[in-house]
Amino acid sequence: MDRSMLYRRFRTLLIANRGEIACRVIRTARAMGLRTVAVYSEADRDAMHVALADEAVLLGPARARDSYLSVERLIEAARKTGAEAVHPGYGFLSENAEFARACLEVGLVFVGPTAAMMTAMGSKSGSKELMEKAGVPLVPGYHGEAQDEATLSKAADNIGFPILVKASAGGGGRGMRIVRSADELGPAIVSAKREAKAAFGDDRMLIEKYVDNPRHIEVQIIGDSHGNLLSLFERECTLQRRHQKVIEEAPSPTLNPAQRETVCAAARKAAGAVNYVGAGTIEFVSDGKDVFFIEMNTRLQVEHPVTELITGIDLVEWQLRVAFGEALPLKQDEIRLNGHAVEARVYAENPTKNFMPSVGRISTWRLPAETGGLRIDAGYREGDTVSPYYDALLAKMIAWAPTRDVAIERLNRGLQDSDVRGIVTNIPFLSALMTHPKVRTNAIDTGFIERELAGLTQASPAPGELELCAAVAAVVNDERQAAQDEALSPWQTFGWMPVGRRQRNFAFRVGHGPEQEITLNYGSGPSTLVTGERELAFTIAPRDGGFDLTLDGVKSQVAAVIDGHELYLRTRNGRFDLHWVDPFGGESEEHVGEDKIAAPLPGTVVAVLAEEGAKLDKGAPILTLEVMKMEQTLRAPYAGVLKSIKCKVGDIVQEGVELAVVEPSGE
């Protein structure tokens, strides 16, 4: 094939993706002088990536299969806008050989490897056969074509438990299950196949020996159409939950220089087996001594920024230059490793509720400035809506420093200085992870988060004296600002008076806990707050996102968000959600029973796991929903009898809809 068909200069780029990666690609493409075209679904009409691009095209309904996964609609969007090239980002169609081939057939440059390279390396099974021939070390496993349960069961028995069942296509932990015994295998295969089919349209499975206490190490590679193939050092991605990466860093703190060169050489050898062109990642698992090839991702990775920060290379720019047909600008020995970088993935999910995805409108979005080695790749802004249809990744926070310890400190400070409201995020969980002593000393493996989950997802501490005083200050500051336009308002009840003193009582509580009272004294002389036996002088100085609270001579920065009687505060002691008890009474609380088996979010019923009339133990699985591309299993809240199931497989259900009824056993 004429290479000019594959790689050539272009001026207009269509980004076939959404969220933070679409925003990331648009920024570099525009900096290179390219015209950018975004695509969007009906759920993303007002999304950030749509606003950033020069043009945008509506693909179709919210469901990915009707929009972002529609090859025909993407090709038509390129035709309408005169786009000459397509960048697929990651996820969706980024590793879909048919999409790459379709682009070529209509004369579009696909910013990535060819369909043939993608087919060879994108299949976990096929790539393992290729690596075996190339002499790259592999984890023992089965990656054959036969997919019947008997063949897979026999392969598992031959390999020996524990084993890993995983989707041959795709990644991100979808379609992947750890199986520790033969009786777990059948259900695991069924569930993994179903999840893989939904995520990738391909339910083929492979089986590998599960490496206990493993580390996940990967090497960034990039090749051009002139035969140059480079490795850009390695990343450590060991901190994972359910096979989804949570924290990534570069370089790996586990490898010494000799090991680093060995694994990078193996990665170049692996990519060289298909004369790879474009950006890609060779992934390895390590047992602490040796490394074994597990797969290649034939695209840009979510965690690519850590590599960019230690090398000074813009990988998206290099991707585009390779697509132009240019040679890579550096040779292998010209690439320098500088310092250390750590990345945290900020998700819309609730760690205290088993990381259930969170949807809704982002009412507050305050992330720190990108200074002092801090970088933020975001796909959302204040006012944007997080929908249930796509991955829950909101942003990535990345910190660079000369050393690992300082990079971790910078990242943690960035997390601590972040306030996102309207939805629930994993920011407190990420901060707890970054401050864990074993993370600091690199005493981790891929099962670390699951083992330490209870400590990493602890509820916020009870508010103390500082928080109660800050709550009063937040209310008073909010009232003062609201009254500025009404100088004579009788509601402006806090301030200096020439004579006399006034008193105002406040009560706050956390959740359904007891009320805590505090009294404000104001008028002539200094204002004070009385809590318990202490009376403290205080002043407030408003600032962006909150105020400075000087309490008993000590000034503290307080971040605050008030929504009616709900207060969010961030002090030096952490984050706190308080309810300001209505001073005029009349509050009513709606207690929602935790025993209701209802859809936690909009989703699709993909499996019914119990029959009506069945006797269930507490925690027994009842049905499975697909929510935000991940499966969520709803379980019996107590022992009893399954009285009724109010849905069937394939039903699309809305948040809060009751799906099943369990009658307690009465024991």
Image (cartoon, rainbow, N blue to C red):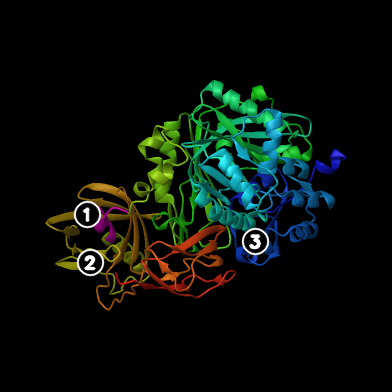
Query: Pointers 2 and 3 in contact (CB under 8 A)?
Result: no
Residue 99: % across, % down:
75, 52
Quick check: can you spot residue 267?
A: yes
Q: Quadrant of residue 506?
A: bottom left
Q: Earlier in the sequence, mark 2 or mark 1?
A: 1
Q: Residue at x 75, y 33 (%)?
A: 275
**Picture layout, residue 427 above or below residue 73:** above
Residue position marked by numbered label 3 in the rendering: 64
- The secondary element bearing badge 3 is classed as helix
**Picture layout, residue 508 above or below residue 339:** below
Inter-mark Cα distance, 2 to 1: 13 Å
Residue closest to the eye, 336 or 390? 390
Q: In the orientation shown, which residue stands out farthest toward the bottom?
A: 586
Q: Residue at x 27, y 69 (%)?
A: 581
Quick check: is 466 in the magenta stretch?
A: yes
Inter-mark Cα distance, 2 to 3: 49 Å
Residue closest to the eye, 157 or 339? 157
Q: Earlier in the sequence, mark 2 or mark 3?
A: 3
Residue 601: % across, % down:
49, 66
Quadrant showing the C terminus: bottom left
Q: In the orientation shown, which residue stands out farthest toward the right?
A: 2
Q: Residue at x 53, y 58 (%)?
A: 631
Left/right placement of residue 345 relative to residue 268 reads left
Amino acid type of the residue tagged 3 in the rendering: Ala
Q: Residue at x 58, y 53 (%)?
A: 189
Quadrant showing the N terminus: top right
Quick check: can you spot residue 329?
A: no
Left/right placement of residue 502 relative to residue 51 reads left
Residue position marked by numbered label 1 in the rendering: 465
Residue 512: % across, % down:
28, 66
Residue position marked by numbered label 2 in the rendering: 506
